[in-house]
Amino acid sequence: MSLPRTEFSETAAERRTMHVPRSHVSIELGHLYIEEFAKGPEYLRAQFERVRPWADVARHVMPGVVPKLKPRVSMCFMVDDYFNQFGSPSDVLPQLITMANEAGLSIDYIARESGCAEADGVPLAELVQGRLVADPPPGANGTRPPVEEIGWLCNGQRSPTWEPTEALREVTPWQAPVENGARNHSIFVDIELWDRGRNDRGPRRWSCSFLAAVWQLLRLGLLRDRGKPVVTPQRWFTPSESGGWQVDDFPERWDELPPVVQVKPADPFCAYKTMSILGPDFLGIESAVRTILERVDIDPEVRSQVENRNQEGGQEKREDISLPAEVVERISYVFLTGNPAG
Amino acid sequence: MLALGEVRTALLQNSVSVPPDVAQQILQLRPGEQVRCSERPVNYAVSPDVPTGVKCRLATRTGKRTWGTGTAVTHASVTGCRVLQGSTYTELALGGAERPAPWSHYLSRSGAVDVTGRASWDDIRDGFLDEEPRDALNLGAISERTMDGVQCRPELDREPPFRARRTALRWTLEDLSEDVPWAHFTIASPTLRTLRLAVKADTDKVLQLCEDLALHDWLLTTLLDLIERGQRKAGRPAEMVESLRPAVEHLLHLWLPGAHVDESLLSLWEGFERRPGFSRQWDVSVNRIRDQLAVTMAGLLSAASAGNVRRH
């Protein structure tokens, strides 16, 4: 007689990682700071007009799906409310949406930059910082803890620091920093991740580079808080009877607006790949973002959800999109230089 | 293929067993990640996995130069709210290209080390098990450092009820070339044990087996130490009782071999139960402690009542 088969499990002992719905591509149409907003609505529209042809190309080229499938593409826009709060959502956002529409673009999602530091009570920036795994110098065998400069991340080995002492007789010659894995010559990058304000005593203030790295991870749907998705875009429009929709009124204060809002019917906010269309000021920042993302340990469960995208919840679904193995290779940019609008 | 690992086991530095929710808190090695807990058959909590980058020599028996680049993965666990373990492992793979890949390539394959050099898998395995690491890959040091981080948590009072050795179990997993899986356990020193395994199984199931074996070996080692300490107090019954008491209070209820081991690997545990017979030695030692305590208590009571009779 064969033995009965029994199984015993405890919910708290199991790792549960939720899926998020995904578009094929998320296209960022821009990033608004106070200085640009101050230049007025005409400037905004001119910027969107420069962005538009690239957004059109990206929409067609980026998804990389088989011709029979309809690609899912979503458009997002980021507003800075972390470094400088300017105006109010009720002033700024309707203008933003209107100027984009006049330039032939439609924004699907609007995000607040401070949402990359903390969103819905989840300290996102700390979460990502906790997942940083620096690439070790040669000789790192596990005996010593990884060297970390508080608040900084680099891509190699820094020049040794020099402390003058009374007994010092000779000046030690400068030793160059070294990029890990450099091809012939180094491009050494040292990135400030956070500080504590000008007097070094205030609350932690995350750098633009670090928040931009969190932003990419949010758009790629790669972050979880104890298995749950971290930011769910809140619907901020009402469908109308004629089949269209109406954007809801925006609040007076930035902290009254959810971290990401959806302002029209659209494909999902998260995507397998991202494309960002930005001005030249962002070259340095996005280079830092790439260096940071190369050192973020993505949850293996989330990584395998993306790898097993043709199977979700035991069901077959067609997600015929080819993806590079490494996360940084799924992020693309267009940098628009030579701005005639000034 | 070849996987390498080292489990370290120690007493949690707290005067009493910690409440289960504290065990969970102290294992929160990373924000935003689940500490997994179970209550049956014994309270058990395990931290999230944390990778550490390594770029170093790998020890070999023959001394052939071999280099590894990649990550080793660590987690810490608390069993019975009393025993702390740190467990680190990595799987070796043949290094491909001449040039090192960007770091993101290694990070995307957590728990893997690419190996370059001419040493064979057997040579690397023997080097790992038998040689002192020195500047070569040292998984035990990563386990130890992770455990130190947990032991320093403010939730713990750092006043353990007795002194106990830390033990290390260094293990390797290789391809199975025979029909039947096999395992070879060696007591290499008073604190170091080695385990050579050949079995077709996922690494996480093999990890559970190694951690379970390491835990029970530590329990047995610690019990034997306590018995020996008790023996040294042979002429002083009250002190002997004090020496043996921690065993009864803190350890005896933790003996549950195979509690967290996958069915497919239980046969290996059963093999060790036949030879050397972990549970047999445990039962004999437990009975010895109970008998010793009973005899000593009887002696103390009769001495006390004799004293009372004389007074009256």
Image (tube, grey):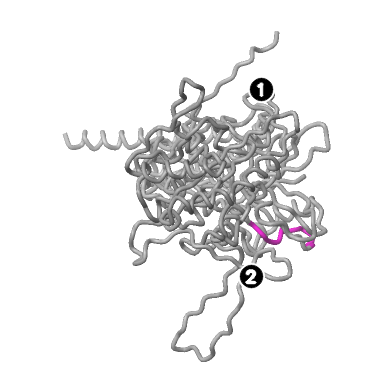
Crowd class of label 1 (few under 14; some 14 to 19; many from 20; radius 10 Å): few
Residue type (three-letter) at the residue carrying disc 2: Val
What is the x, y in percent for residue B266? 66, 29
- If you read the primary sequence from the N terminus, does the residue marked by circle 1 or circle 2 appear first? 2
Crowd class of label 2 (few under 14; some 14 to 19; many from 20; radius 10 Å): some
Specify whether residue B89 is painted magenta.
no
What secondary structure do most residues of the magenta stretch adopt? loop
Residue found at x 53% / y 52% = A46
Q: Chain of mark 1?
A: A
Specify whether residue B59 is painted magenta.
yes
Relative horizontal placement of residue A112, taking residue A279 as reference (left or right): left
Of the two numbered discs 1 and 2 in the rendering, the one whose residue sits closer to the viewer:
1
Q: Chain of mark 2?
A: A
Residue under label 2, please give it: A178
What is the x, y in percent for residue A188? 61, 68
Residue B263 occupies quadrant: top right
Q: Is residue A118 visible?
A: yes
Instruction: Pick out the residue farthest to the bottom.
Output: A169
**Up/down of B113 relative to B213, above or below:** below
Instruction: Pick out the residue farthest to the top.
Output: A1
Relative horizontal placement of residue A197, taking residue B291 as reference (left or right): left
Tell me the SS state at disc 2: strand
Q: Is residue A145 visible?
A: no
What is the x, y in percent for residue A132? 54, 53
Residue under label 1, please give it: A315
Q: Which stretch is magenta?
A: B54-64
Residue found at x 63% / y 40% = A25
Between B268 and A289, which is closer to the camera in this rendering? A289
Q: Are marks 1 and 2 on the same chain?
A: yes
What is the x, y in percent for residue B217? 58, 41
